[in-house]
Image (cartoon, coloured by chain):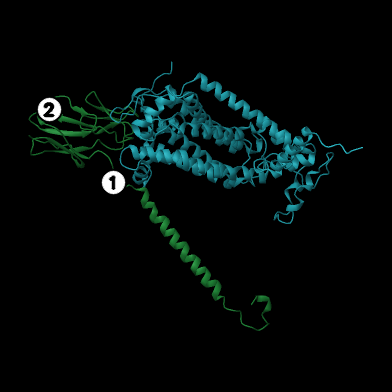
Chain colours: A green, B cyan
């Protein structure tokens, strides 16, 4: 029944069919949006085929005293402080992720010239944070174990 | 006397003519009517108008920069398709396939050079195109939104170039992407998630390479094709800026096919107070066939010749294989990001996120803020002195920063002289 056919005085016909149609389309749209939003999770990998963040680096006596040993594969500096003990500092510049190099008493970054002191604290340059220190421990097989998910303060020393 | 039967030669010509006619309905146009019809009836040609203003045809007005960008995109698509036949998106294999392209595959090195140099050229040309549109005030009504599409296309061009940068998997690629993705990590709140999403993990690895490959070869080119179609379609609908506009219809002085007849069929559909033809001076216009097409062909040939010359003379760089344990000193991003890297060397958040973010925001908002209609369609119109001065100043700063980053920065990002 089209609107034109309505006689004057009739109450406007309740547009039930149209409302039902809109409700149906709306529900479908919400469901589709939900599916799309949920599919976003697809983009985040559940398994990372990356090197472990907890690894052994060798026996304590492998690391000579004095200047630190740079382990390029793990991107860390390992220090043997003699009687004081061992500690490990990250070589990943906190600015944009380049490898810092040992230079002078501290470290310098080749990418944007950030400089750190011997404890990894920022001296100058754009780096926003100090180089992180990683927790060291000794395994039962007398190997040094680095855990990159455990950040420690710069007074950390591992006595062997 | 018997009616002479057509010779075999005549029959072949007739049949061949019928086949040609079935492919190209108009054929080679001989009359003005056909010159208009050929433009409208072909899907490839109809992104051009049938008639085009003489002003828009002047090489000194547009410099052909939009056209050159499109040609470069076409060349990049073709050379890219060819390279994909040999390229393997897996770290060590990727580098090996680059070496193959360079030393084993016939003409592989030329195709790779062309791909690399057209990519660099496209970044520059798209940027110049944006400058041209600004300096001629062409983003004014009714082209505001087309400017916004253009800004998005510029960003897509940068992203395309950037994602392609990782694919060779050499030192240059690895560290440029390390720096680039770490800049993304400085974005507020979601920075680390963006980086994780881009890399597909915490470090640049096989997943990252595959993601960049898919973005570079499928996602971004598709987006560019869609937006370029929209961009050109709107130019076609709105006309080029700077055409002579008149308030009342002007009688056409000559020509067999009056311009104002061609949209009569559309008059019932148009919502404007008057169809656009009424506001144009038909005496300012010439047929796109052959005037526009001839110029396009000429520019296309010139670009192809120039690219071949450059690709024969200059080799695209390929350094040693990517080594996550050894950062080259200095580690530099591609040249078009070196201005950004120079800013980032002072502060990662301000230089890498805040300043570029604000510039993009300003570019998008520009046509809606600068609403005057004066001075559109001419280079450096005096009425637009303020807008032009601000824009030029920003461009000069960006260029200076890029030059500093490219030539004046050495080991540890310290100051060096380029000589």
* Residue B152 screen position, x and y as percent: 52, 42
Residue at the extreme right of the image, as rendered: B1
Q: Residue at x 61, y 82 (%)?
A: A11
**Badges 2 and 1, same chain:** yes
Residue at the extreme front of the image, as rendered: B1
Tell which subunit mark 2 falls on: A
At label 2, counting other C-alpha atoms closer than 10 Å, the crowd grade (few under 14, some 14-19, many 20 or more) is few
Q: Secondary structure at mark 1?
A: loop
Tell which subunit mark 1 falls on: A
Q: Residue at x 81, y 42 (%)?
A: B257
* Residue B269 screen position, x and y as percent: 71, 56
Q: Quadrant of the N terminus of chain B?
A: top right
- Asked whether the residues under the numbered discs 2 and 1 touch, taking CB atoms below 8 Å apart as contact, a structural biologist would say no
Q: Quadrant of the C terminus of chain B?
A: top left
Give the mark count: 2
Q: Above or below — where is B231 with respect to B345?
A: below
Q: Residue at x 66, y 35 (%)?
A: B382
Q: Is residue B258 visible?
A: yes
Q: Nearer the viewer, mark 2 or mark 1?
A: 1
Q: Secondary structure at mark 2?
A: helix
Q: Is residue B60 visible?
A: no
The residue at which mark 2 appears reads as: A62
Is residue B182 left or right of B287 when viewed as pictured? left
- Disc nearer the start of the sequence (2/1): 1
């Amino acid at each position: 029944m089209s609107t034109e056919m309505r006689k004057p005085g009739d109450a406007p016909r309740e547009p039930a069919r149209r409302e039902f149609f809109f409700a149906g389309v709306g529900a479908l749209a919400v469901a589709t949006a939900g599916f799309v939003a949920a599919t976003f999770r697809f983009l985040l990998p559940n398994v990372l085929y990356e090197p472990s963040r907890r690894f052994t680096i060798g026996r304590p006596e492998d690391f000579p005293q004095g200047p630190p040993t740079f382990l390029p594969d793990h991107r860390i500096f390992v220090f043997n402080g003699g009687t004081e003990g061992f500690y490990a500092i990250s070589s990943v510049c906190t600015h944009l992720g380049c490898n810092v190099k040992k230079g002078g008493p501290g470290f310098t970054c080749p990418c944007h010239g950030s400089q750190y002191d011997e404890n990894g604290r920022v001296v100058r340059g754009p780096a926003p944070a100090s180089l992180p220190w990683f927790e060291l421990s000794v395994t039962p097989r007398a190997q040094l174990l680095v855990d990159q998910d455990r950040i420690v303060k710069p007074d950390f020393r591992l006595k062997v | 006397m018997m009616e002479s039967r057509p010779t075999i030669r005549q029959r072949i010509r007739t049949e061949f003519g019928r086949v040609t006619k079935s492919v190209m309905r108009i054929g080679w146009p001989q009359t003005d009517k056909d010159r208009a019809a050929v433009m409208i009836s072909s899907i490839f040609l109809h992104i051009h108008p049938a008639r085009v203003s003489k002003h828009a045809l002047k090489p000194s007005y547009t410099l052909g920069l939009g056209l050159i960008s499109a040609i470069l995109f076409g060349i990049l698509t073709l050379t890219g398709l060819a390279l994909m036949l040999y390229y393997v998106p897996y770290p060590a294999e990727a580098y090996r396939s680059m070496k193959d392209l360079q030393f084993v595959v016939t003409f592989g090195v030329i195709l790779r050079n062309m791909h690399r140099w057209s990519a660099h050229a496209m970044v520059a040309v798209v940027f110049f195109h944006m400058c041209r549109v600004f300096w001629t005030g062409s983003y004014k009504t009714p082209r505001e939104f087309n400017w916004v599409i253009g800004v998005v296309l510029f960003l897509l061009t940068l992203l395309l170039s950037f994602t392609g940068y990782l694919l060779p998997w050499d030192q240059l690629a690895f560290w440029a992407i390390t720096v680039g993705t770490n800049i993304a990590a400085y974005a507020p709140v979601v920075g680390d998630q963006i980086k994780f999403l881009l890399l597909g993990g915490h470090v640049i690895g096989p997943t990252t390479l595959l993601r960049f490959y898919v973005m570079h070869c499928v996602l971004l080119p598709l987006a560019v094709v869609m937006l370029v179609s929209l961009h050109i379609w709107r130019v076609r609908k709105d006309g080029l800026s700077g055409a002579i506009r008149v308030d009342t219809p002007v009688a056409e002085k000559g020509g067999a096919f009056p311009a104002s007849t061609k949209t009569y069929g559309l008059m019932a559909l148009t919502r404007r107070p008057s169809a656009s033809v009424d506001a144009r001076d038909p005496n300012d216009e010439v047929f796109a066939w052959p005037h526009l097409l001839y110029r396009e062909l000429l520019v296309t040939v010139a670009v192809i010749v120039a690219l071949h010359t450059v690709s024969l003379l200059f080799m695209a760089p390929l350094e040693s294989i990517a080594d996550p344990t050894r950062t080259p000193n200095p580690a530099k991003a591609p040249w078009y990001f070196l201005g950004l890297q120079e800013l980032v060397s002072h502060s990662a958040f301000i230089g890498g996120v805040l300043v570029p973010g604000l510039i993009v925001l300003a570019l998008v908002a520009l046509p809606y803020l600068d609403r005057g209609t004066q001075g559109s369609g001419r280079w450096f119109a005096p009425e637009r002195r303020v807008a032009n001065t601000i824009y030029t100043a920003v461009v000069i700063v960006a260029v200076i920063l890029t030059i500093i980053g490219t030539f004046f920065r050495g080991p540890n990002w310290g100051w060096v002289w380029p000589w």
